[in-house]
Image: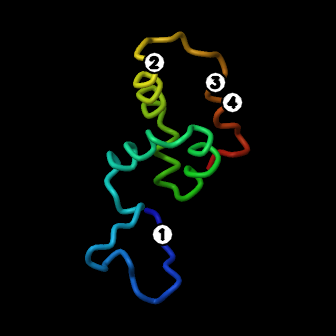
Amino acid sequence: MCVYFSGSSTDVTNTPGVVVLQTLPTEVVVNICSFLEAKFLLQSFRLVCKRFHDILSDVRFWKARLYRRWKKNYPPVAGLWSMMFPPSTRV
């Protein structure tokens, strides 16, 4: 679960009409991610919280993203997963 620090003692997640990114359904987060650059997703967005890291570490997310972009099945690139997620950056 992601933690949201609002800077005040009021819990923003319980305020009517306020939507916090971390409380959105996974499908909505994945849709938002489809508009963001892969570099940003890997270097920044997945570090926000464990939930985002888990979503962006799922190979199905990246396969779907590649398919939407190129609409073809390309052969796997050896070592691609290790390049995208070096052991030093894994949570």
Screen quadrant of the N terminus: bottom left
Q: Marks 3 and 4, Cα distance to the nearest angstrom?
A: 5 Å
Q: Marks 2 and 4, Cα distance to the nearest angstrom?
A: 21 Å
Dot 4 or dot 1, earlier in sequence:
1
Dot 2 or dot 3, earlier in sequence:
2
Dot 2 or dot 1, earlier in sequence:
1
To which residue does mark 2 refer?
A: 70
To which residue does mark 4 refer?
A: 83
Mark 2 lies on a secondary structure that is helix
Q: Position of residue 3 (x, y in %)?
A: 48, 69
Residue that lies at the very extreme toward the left in this rendered image: 16
To which residue does mark 1 refer?
A: 3
Residue 80, labelled with which disc? 3
Q: Marks 2 and 3, Cα distance to the nearest angstrom?
A: 17 Å
Q: Does 24 appear above or below 60?
A: below
Tag 3: amino acid: Leu
Q: Are marks 3 and 4 in contact (CB under 8 Å)?
A: yes
Tag 2: amino acid: Trp
Q: Marks 4 and 1, Cα distance to the nearest angstrom?
A: 29 Å
Mark 1 lies on a secondary structure that is loop
Nearer the observer, disc 2 or disc 1?
2
Mark 4 lies on a secondary structure that is helix
Q: Marks 3 and 1, Cα distance to the nearest angstrom?
A: 31 Å
- Residue 87 or 53: which is nearer the viewer? 53
